[in-house]
Image (cartoon, helix red, strand yellow):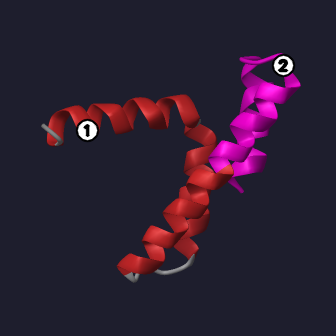
Amino acid sequence: MAVLISILRVIYDGEETDRTRMFLEALICGSLSLTAASIIQWLGLPDDVAIAIGGSVGFVGVQKIREYAFRWMDKWVK
């Protein structure tokens, strides 16, 4: 889900014209979604939540997630 939404988002926004970067973005979104799915399973949440997380990751994109992660680390890890 994350891979598909990521590709469609990049095409729709016209952010990236380089196909290699577009597919790398999609693969990274897919990898982040797999990581999130493992965390969801570890927390004991329903498996259907993983689809929602995957779609969200694809929609938001790698750059925004990276920004959020750095912001969180700056706030909580000192």
Q: In this view, does 40 lie above or below 18?
A: below
The extreme front residue here reads 78
Q: Which mark is residue 73?
A: 1
Residue that mark 2 sits on? 18
Q: Which amino acid does label 2 sit on?
A: Asp
Q: Position of residue 71 (x, y in %)?
A: 29, 31
Disc 1 residue crowd, few under 14, some 14–19, many 20+, Cα 10 Å: few
Q: Position of residue 3 (x, y in %)?
A: 74, 49
Magenta-highlighted residues? 1-29
Residue 76 shown in magenta: no
Q: Which image quarter is the N terminus in? A: bottom right
Q: In this view, does 65 lie above or below 51?
A: above
Question: What distance separates the C-alpha of mark 1 from that of mark 2?
Answer: 31 Å
Whether residues under marks 1 and 2 lie with C-beta atoms below 8 angstroms apart, the answer is no
Residue under the point 71% across and 17% down = 15
**38 with respect to 28 (left or right):** left
User: Tag 2, which secondary structure?
Assistant: loop
Residue under the point 41% across and 78% down = 42
Is residue 45 visible from the viewing direction of this image? Answer: no
Q: Which amino acid does label 1 sit on?
A: Met
Residue 13 shown in magenta: yes
